[in-house]
Image (tube, rainbow, N blue to C red):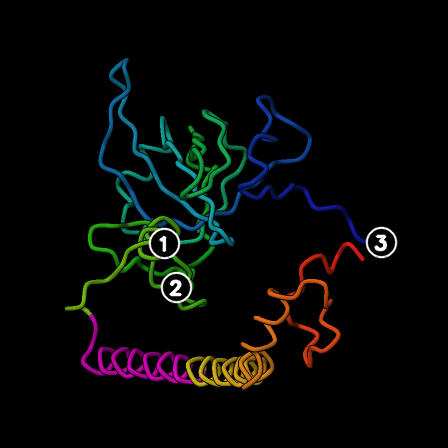
Amino acid sequence: RHKAPQYLALPFSRLRELPSKKQERDRVVFGILYDCSDLEKMGNGELYVRWHLTDLAQPPRLLNLQLRGGAFTHWRGRQAGARRGCLFAISNPRLVEDGNGAACTGRVAVARVDKACQLEVLGECPSLGTCATKGCRLPCNADLCQRFCASCAIVEHNRVPPASELSARCVALLRSDRRALQAVAAGREGVESAEDRGKRARTNAALQLDDRRFFHAQAQEDYVRSVCAPADRGGGSSSSRVPVLGRGLQ
């Protein structure tokens, strides 16, 4: 029968489950080191260093780890062993400030370690990439061919590149697409105008046929006869459209 592991692995999204007191099973957090800060000083004069770690999740989560006490003394002279890209196992860190760890939409969590034995190097992570934005040190995933970190990716997506950054080929393609759209629009206008002309011709033909009924050779004589001789209710009229006084009163 398999024995249960002696530790419980916690992802960055569950750092709030880190206990404040010692438990039967150790809580271990795995993170990739992507940046180290300079020496910092607490309010009481204590020196410490801050490590920045990530889990390279999608989206990546971040963790600020404070090395204080024995951990600071041990790793201060071994910065070469704690270089960028190293994968660390952190045993029972203390949560100083809770956060969701999101790189671009939330507050980064802060934890601390006081003993050197709480940190162990497991190896190096080749998947850690460097953001292409100048001066940015946030991580990105090289295996996914990411060129920007999560924060810079949003800025780059919303940024409209100037024309100078577009290659001549792209400009030519855009111009050709514009001309094609203009040609299609002109063709639609031509088709619509031809349809309008056809409707207008049919309307004019119908009006001409209707005018033949009212404006024939005897139309005026029928009108005068119907007005001058109202007693005759258009009986001799050759057209049913000839106006007759009192026709509606019959």
The earlier-in-sequence mark between 2 and 3 is: 3
Q: Which mark is residue 149?
A: 1
How crowded pointer 3 is (Cα within 10 Å; few <14, some 14-19, many 20+) is rated as few
Asked if the stretch drawn in magenta spans residue 87, the answer is no
- Residue 138 location, x and y as percent? 33, 49
Left or right: residue 203 compared with residue 235: left
Q: Is residue 71 above or below residue 44?
A: below
Give the magenta-colored segment's residue range.
166-191
Q: Are marks 1 and 2 in contact (CB under 8 Å)?
A: yes
Snapshot quadrant of residue 169: bottom left
Q: Relative to 246, does residue 215 appear above or below in the rendering?
A: below
Within-10-Å neighbours for mark 1: few <14, some 14–19, many 20+ = many
Residue at point 46% right, 41% down?
102
Q: Is 64 left or right of 46, judged from the image as shown?
A: right
**Helix, strand or loop: magenta stretch:** helix
Q: Earlier in the sequence, mark 1 or mark 3?
A: 3
The image quarter in which residue 10 lies: top right
The residue lying at 46 percent from left, 50 percent from top is: 60
User: Could you tell me which secondary element the residue under label 1 belongs to?
Assistant: loop
Cα distance between the residues tagged 1 and 2: 7 Å
Q: Residues within 10 Å of mark 2 (few under 14, many from 20)?
A: some
Q: CA distance from mark 2 to mark 3?
A: 43 Å
Check disc 3 and give the amino acid type.
Arg
| Residue behind mark 2 | 146
Q: CA distance from mark 1 to mark 3?
A: 44 Å
Residue 109 location, x and y as percent?
Answer: 45, 33
Specify the farthest residue to the top: 44
Of residues 155 and 53, which is closer to you in this image?
A: 155
Secondary structure under the numbered disc 3 in the rendered image: loop
Which residue in the structure is indicated by mark 3?
A: 1
